[in-house]
Amino acid sequence: MAELDIDTRAAKLGIDWSQVNLDSIQLPPGENFGIESDDEGVYHDDQLEFDTGFGNIIVVDNLPVVPKTKFEKLENVLKKIYSQLGAIKEKGLWMPVDPNTGMTLGYCFIEFNTPQEAQNAKEKTHGYKLDKSHIFAVNMFDDFDRLMNVKEEWEAPQTKPYVPGENLQKWLTDEKARDQLVTRSGPDTEVFWNDARQKNTELVHKRSYWTESYVQWSPLGTYLVTLHKQGAAVWGGADTFTRLMRYQHNMVKLVDFSPGEKYLVTYHSQEPSNPRDASKVEIKVFDVRTGRMMRDFKGSADEFSIGGPGGVAGASWPVFRWAGGKDDKYFAKLSKNTISVYETETFGLIDKKSIKVDNVVDICWSPTDSILSLFVPEQGGGNQPAKVALVQIPSKVELRQKNLFSVSDCKMYWQSSGEYLAVKVDRYTKTKKSTYSGFELFRIKERDIPIEVLELDNKNDKIIAFAWEPKGHRFAVIHGDQPRPDVSFYTMKTTQHGGRVTKLGTLKAKQANALFWSPTGKYIILAGLKNFNGQLEFFNVDELETMATTEHFMATDIEWDPTGRYVATAVTSVHEMENGFTIWSFNGKLLYRNLKDHFFQLAWRPRPPSFLSPEKEEEIAKNLKKYSKKYELEDQDVSLLLSEQDREKRKALKEEWEKWVKQWKSLHEEEKLARQNLRDGEISDEEEEEDEAKEVKEVEFEDVIDVTEEVVQE
Amino acid sequence: MRPILMKGHERPLTFLRYNRDGDMLFSCAKDHTPTLWYADNGERHGTYRGHNGAVWCCDVSRDSSRLITGSADQTAKLWDVKTGQQLFSFKFSSPARSVDFSVGDKLAVITTDPFMEHTSAIHVKRIADDPQDQVGDSVLVLENPEGRKRINRAVWGPLNQTIVSGGEDAVLRIWDAETGKLLKETDKEVGHKQTITSLCKSADDSHFITGSLDKTAKACLWDMRTLTLIKTYTSGVPVNAVSLSPLLDHVVIGGGQDASAVTTTDHRAGKFEAKFYDKILQEEIGGVKGHFGPINALAFNPDGRSFSSGGEDGYVRLHHFDSDYFNIKI
């Protein structure tokens, strides 16, 4: 009531408002004179939902038809079943009775407190077998209307005419067989062709503010995903990048594709308002092509990490690890004492049960098979040994396991075709004061999965980096002490001893702390990033020889193109100076540089695996000379064309300049007199310039004489 | 090409200037004493004592008789080149940043920094033939529209009709030298994005080049009358100094990482290199390394056969080109 209203009302009733002491007025209990309290409205809303909605009522059909005598017994049975699934409202179970016969009608209504409980009860008891002839048919009360309206006759759904989609793989058909790469710098995200022949990039698509955090290629290169406030989006297409699908997920932070790029996993975490609480995590799994959300996972960050308190804030990404291969059948999540493996058919747990493994800290999928390797550290102060095990999914059979003693840490490295698993084991020395490292090598594809133990020549060497040769049998290790560690190469297969790991060689004292194998194997870059300021050594492992040693000063990132022909090294914006990227050939020849300020990211567009069989590939490698001829010719043509174009461009520039200078010269001529006046009649400068030019010529001649004199002296 | 190291300054170099004959090199540094060197062998000829602050800039008259210097002690001084005597001192209420003689040496343009309540300004002074008649009054004072931003360089346009200025606001302006009217200024989109640090005219005054600290650190070539951007040379680092070869179609750009960041990073990160570019093709030809601090000053000998660079390291490096330099083909 407005104050004015109150005053007029009081005047009408003859009350002197100023005399009234409001505090002294007492209302009769339970009476509110129709004045609503602020929070009463909220209460009412709740009430409304309870009264009118039938969302919390289920209808249970196919009950036994019973006479009055057995009514109570049946009622009790039903109450017993359903009260387990949710709180039944008072008088919430109603079983109608035929007034003529006194028999029940074979169905009942049950009202729960909340629609969620009702939904749950419906799902759980639909198809429940009370006995052989009575199988429950449970429906939501609200669904009845909808179900009644279903037409009796089946109507054939209209077939939509087929609209051919864009060829999402068109970039693979590039005539010059170039590869694409995406870069982010400043506000711009750009996709380029790496045109190594032209020694430059060719722009495919450029867009400012394309993404709000970063971009990522899908594993087979079909899509480029961008992140936005509202969710993620994928881009691709034949000629340019168009948006193919959006995935709604507010404030998405991270994304991950399944290896066959069928599914997209998005991650969002909410910082808690109270710093002692764990942050909230929401993960959604989308079908990439349809954009349908397949499943979402919510919970506190603790459920998605094993670190516990003191561990990483939030979860370590990717939370869900996908089983290898293109089928995208399984994905696993590691949480405290359990490994949850989901299958994508139902998006539920396999066998509806997680795998219980006490204290498991790390899991790793084989890149090609559905084999999971897991690591359990020592427990009970060393009474229970540490364990590395291989588990077959979905059977959950343990294929192989190895107990390890006095272990401080383990790291698992799968070889890219899933043939080998290397486990780097850090063990305590006897004094427990320091650790030393060794390797356990599993041969997955051989019978019984034999395990081999490998120790470095110098057991005390620290292991700085380890990398398998992609698709190959070799691996490289950087070991020893900084700043000049050694690099060793080993092979799992040699002609002399077939099934034994053998050392190929060691390079002493290299400035390297990271290993980058070419995706086709054979070549490796020994890189000294960070402290080493971007030292690069291009190494041929077949010949065990260095092809080139160079440097990309301050380089932070190194990435091979998917074909192994080129390497991109980049200085990202962690440094202020010289941001940008450089493209090298596989053997360490600098091809071109591209400087960009505020350079954030570089990523090659992956290629799907080749359809050629290994035999065919080998054959091509053997007859490379034959195949390469054609391309060499092309290269030559291009370089000729390039120099031709260059010449013409230069000519044009020169002509333009000359024209401009000529124009100026005429102006200068006109002003000659005025200038002379300004200088009190001193000679004009043109003449002098000519003099100077002459002088210069003489001087050049002198220089030449100087040179010959020196020769004589020698 | 073996450089001659000229060690005479105790503080970072700020400016270098050859006389018209190319036999003398004047250097300015933050150590208060402009110095005169023989441009041929790099021997020190003498110094000009009298300033009480960093000397930012200098210019020498066509007949090599007068030297004008601008200093942070809020004066610009006229000197007798031969005797080293101070002839006159123009007093300002803020540091003098740049000085330039007009054609005929009858006028000088001096820019002053913003300081306390004073905004940056461009002063035009008349230079008397006889130093006895010299007065300190300004013929013309131009107020910078962006008064709190420094003007780093102002030079005379053709026939002394215009004055070209550039500074911290990254805008180049052309003023009418008679009326003081602003005739033209560069478009933000086309021009530099950050402080213009240096400006150098071509030998025939037809164009000039500017260096800037902007992200791409480019030097631009401008048509002197229309103020149109003709060429851009991209350097990876902030540019402090630029110069045009009077002989060949070359430009030289110097600079490097900001001096305050030098000690925190590897020496190779600095790029303290004088880079040569082809003026027409805008392609890099080569670089001359040697300084261990950013390059602050560059100057070509008027004969185009040598150039000198001055660095934050306090050295002047005098380079006589090898004969190979004159036969560079790209």
Image (cartoon, rainbow, N blue to C red):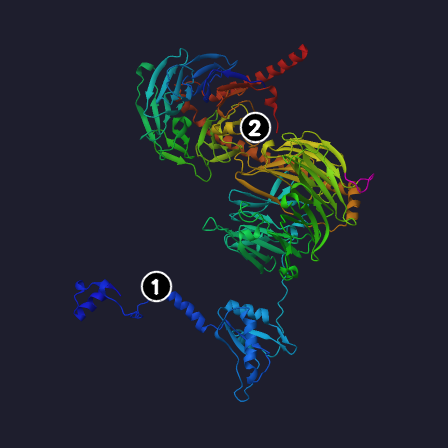
Q: Nearer the viewer, residue A366 or B226?
A: A366
- As shown in the figure, which amino acid type bears the numbered disc 2? Arg
The main secondary structure of the magenta stretch is: loop
Q: Residue drawn at (61%, 33%), measured in percent from left and top? A: A534
Q: Residue drawn at (55%, 88%), measured in percent from left and top? A: A101
Q: Is residue A127 magenta?
A: no
- As shown in the figure, which amino acid type bears the numbered disc 1? Asp
The magenta stretch spans which residues?
Answer: A494-501
* Image depth: mark 1 or mark 2 in front: 1
**Are circles 1 and 2 on residues that touch, CB within 8 Å?**
no
Element carrying mark 2: helix
Q: Where is residue B259 in the image (x, y as percent from the top left)?
A: 48, 27
Q: Which of A319 and B81 is in front in this view?
A: A319
Any mark on residue A38, and which?
1
Q: Pinpoint the chain carrying mark 2.
A: B
Element carrying mark 1: loop
Report the number of discs.
2
Vertical arrangement, residue A706 with respect to residue A408, above or below: above
Q: Is residue A330 left or right of residue B275?
A: right
Q: Position of residue A360 (x, y in %)?
A: 63, 49
Any mark on residue B268, and which?
2
Quadrant showing the C terminus of chain A: top right
Mark 2, residues whose alpha carbon is within 10 Å: few (<14), some, or many (≥20)? few
